[in-house]
Amino acid sequence: MTSVIIVGAGVIGLMTAIELQRAGARVTLVDRQQAGRESSWAGGGILSPLFPWRYPDPVSRLARLSQALYPRLIDELRQDVDVDPEYLPSGMLVLGAYEEEEPEAWARRFEVNMQPVQGDQIHQLEPGLAEGHDRGWWFPEVHQARNPRLVALLRAWIEQSDIDLVENLPVDSIRIEGGRATGVRAGSRELSAERVVIASGAWSAGLLDPLDCTTGIEPVRGQMLLLKATPGQVQRILLSEDRYIIPRRDGRVLVGSTTERVGFDKSVSAEVRESLVDYALRTLPGLSDAEVEHHWSGLRPGSPDGIPAIGKHPKIEGLFINAGHYRNGLVMAPASARLLTDLLLKRTACLPPADYAPCDAVHKKN
Ligand SMILES: Cc1cc2nc3c(=O)[nH]c(=O)nc-3n(C[C@H](O)[C@H](O)[C@H](O)COP(=O)(O)OP(=O)(O)OC[C@H]3O[C@@H](n4cnc5c(N)ncnc54)[C@H](O)[C@@H]3O)c2cc1C
């Protein structure tokens, strides 16, 4: 039985641990705090890239495979633990994106159900929408998950499995002996395994840079607001102007987000709060009574072209990477976990591995 240590228990580390364990590996999952408290907690949970046709194909491939894997994965995990991740078919309405040929060609190529909508059709889909939105794209099959609940489901499943979850243990470095990764060092502790996977989100470069692996992963801050509206007041995931609105089942509404390159700084600003409120009210005037309940930020693991690094370190035996999912970590997580597991266990890869090869920081676009 192959033993594996995974460093980082965000959605990527959690799903990779589950996939590896179910494929027969003995897994230890380490996080420096409680699992799932960083980007995977802070995000919006839209299970599709935003303006998906604008991404390189390797992102679309991971997203499409994940979208196919999600329903069964959620069902199977929920058979063992009673945590509802609010995996809901809200659909996504993209407004004000007037490109024509590119989205249609992309949707045909990736077999995505995407429909052009106009005028009244738009207002039927989202009755509370402000006037002036006359064209858009409707994705009826896009789902969402509620981030804190999705990570709670994954963590609860792991706790009842034989995966060893070690929380509140910051890993300082990867132990390399004779050109091979043999474990991790964490303060005065050393943990050993035959394989090590770095899945440390925005912090991955800190562990990889000393190992001659340039991934270009860096933190990109996103600020988010939570408004208290009433159930059903907003019905669809709405996307326009690189901002979005996500309705949760209990009526709460998320409004996001920014893309700020400010290092590892998770502070929030009054200016962004005002601009997100302004966007929400311009889009859905009925939200004027909705109180702002919470304002937070998270650090996305930004990467060149948004393509994650998934696979083996080119020089160090036994060292693997699954990181750099930028704005699409939730939607790409199941397929990323599957691909990493395929490569680590030397199974046939579910997607072309060269597209995600780590440590060169330059990916192929198509
Ligand atoms: C505002 C915002 C909105 C978003 N919206 C969406 C969306 O709608 N849809 C979507 O698909 N994606 C979205 N994302 C992106 C998505 O959240 C991320 O891509 C995804 O969460 C990355 O997961 P991860 O596991 O790689 O990173 P993280 O969740 O950040 O997890 C990394 C983990 O590694 C741990 N760690 C780091 N260093 C160490 C160390 N040295 N030792 C031990 N542990 C360590 C951390 O504690 C953390 O738990 C959004 C992100 C943000 C911030």
Image (cartoon, grey):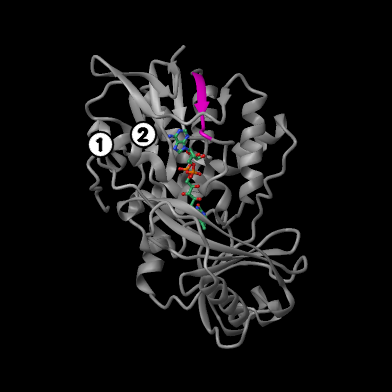
Element assignment for label 2: strand
Examine the residues drawn in magenta and state their main secondary structure: strand
Residue at image position (44%, 25%) is 186
Cβ of mark 2 under 8 Å from ligand 1: the answer is: no
> Horizontal and vertical percent for residue 294?
65, 62
Marks 2 & 1, CB-CB < 8 Å contact: yes
**Amino acid at circle 1:** Cys
Residue at image position (27%, 39%) is 354
Q: Is 156 drawn above or below residue 333 in the view shown?
A: above
Residue 257 visible, this orientation: yes
Q: Is 184 drawn above or below residue 113 in the view shown?
A: above
> Horizontal and vertical percent for residue 228?
73, 67
Residue 23 visible, this orientation: no
Q: Which mark is residue 213?
A: 1
Q: Which mark is residue 156?
A: none
Mark 2 nearby-residue class (10 Å; few <14, some 14–19, many ≥20): many
Residue at image position (65%, 75%) is 126
Element assignment for label 1: loop
Residue under circle 2?
321
Q: Nearer the viewer, residue 75 or 251?
A: 251
Q: Quadrant of residue 198?
A: top left
**Amino acid at circle 2:** Ile
Q: Is 127 drawn above or below residue 35 in the view shown?
A: below
What residue occupies the far front of the structure in this picture? 188
Question: How far apart are the alpha carbons under marks 2 and 1?
Answer: 10 Å
Which region is colored magenta?
Answer: 26-32
